[in-house]
Amino acid sequence: MSVFARLVEQLADLLQPLFHASAAAAAIVLFTALVRLLVHPLSRAAARGQRARAALQPRIAELRAKHAEDPGRLQQAVLELHAEERVSPLSGCLPSLLQIAFFLLYHLFSSSSAGGGAGGLLSHRLLAAPLGGRWTDALADGGVFGTAGLVYLALFALVAAVAAFTYRRTRLMTAKAPVTLTAGDGERTPGLGAVNRLLPFMSFFTLVTVAVVPLAAALYVVTSTTWSAVERAALYR
């Protein structure tokens, strides 16, 4: 973790002539974008795997019907189908691996010891807002339209725009390819309908995250969320 913090601090030193007192904030945004760029090939592979697995679902359904009384034979047939079509069942694990990496970055930017504690990343500012502060601190120091409060208003506006874009895209994708509400035996899956209705609104929960975490972590969350929205729109169009 300290290695990442040192990299961000060195990047902040490079950006200081351009961004001055906000160089650390700019370094967090740029470092997050660079990490997302480095792992983009994994995201692209995960998207290819998801499309390939989706294309196999009708044939897998036929195998389930054919081998309904023999689970062992069904499993073997599904593995043979994946091998025949050169689709790796393990490609679905890639998003989980990516989430672990992103969690480590979030912990870096939200930890009180980030970059060495008292003189580290969280001691810097974005304009008038301390990177170690929260929205409640900005409200107590000048209110919603204070100098620090305006920084949060700008972040909220960006997050709301990204969330609205994600919401609209999720609704359109759901309408084009609605998720089935039945299990393999034809019975209705309990609670899945409610989950599907709630799913488009999940992106708006980022507003709550930005409001309660330190500003450094909020910058990471906003950058990563914006990247994810654009990346998914490109990979899953």
Image: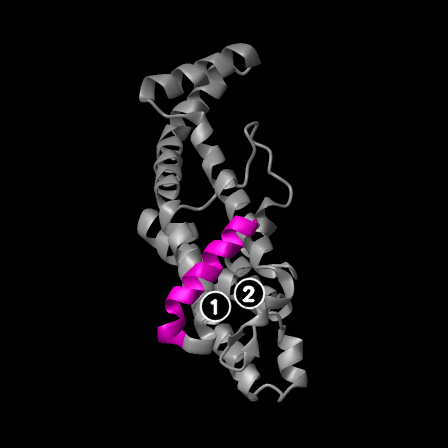
| Pick the front one: 50 or 1 | 1
Q: Residue 24 carries which label?
A: 1
Residue 21 in percent (x, y) is at 47, 77
Give the residue displayed 40% in from the left and 25% down from the top.
88
Mark 2–mark 1 Cα distance, whole angstroms, equals: 6 Å
Foreground residue, 30 or 86?
A: 30
Q: Residue 121 carries which label?
A: 2
Instruction: Let me know if residue 48 appears in the view.
Output: yes
Magenta highlight: main SS: helix
Tell me what residue is drawn at x 31 percent, y 52 percent.
234
Of helix, strand and loop, which one carries label 1?
A: helix
- Binning the other alpha carbons within 10 Å of mark 1 as few (below 14), some (14 to 19) or many (20 upward) gives many
**Residue 99 on the magenta segment:** no
User: Residue 193's spot in the image, x, y percent?
Assistant: 57, 48
Can residue 226 be seen in this snapshot?
Answer: no
- In the image, what residue type sits under mark 1? Ala
Write the start and end of the magenta stretch as one range. 1-19
Q: Nearer the viewer, residue 234 or 187?
A: 234
Q: Determine whether, in the image, residue 95 is placed left or right of residue 2.
A: left
Mark drawn on residue 209: none
* Residue at point 54%, 77% (across, down): 152
- The amino acid type, in three-letter code, at marker 2 is Leu
Identify whether 45 is placed above or below 21.
above
Secondary structure found at label 2: helix
Decide: is 197 above or below 25.
Answer: above
- Disc 2 vs disc 1: Cβ atoms closer than 8 Å? yes
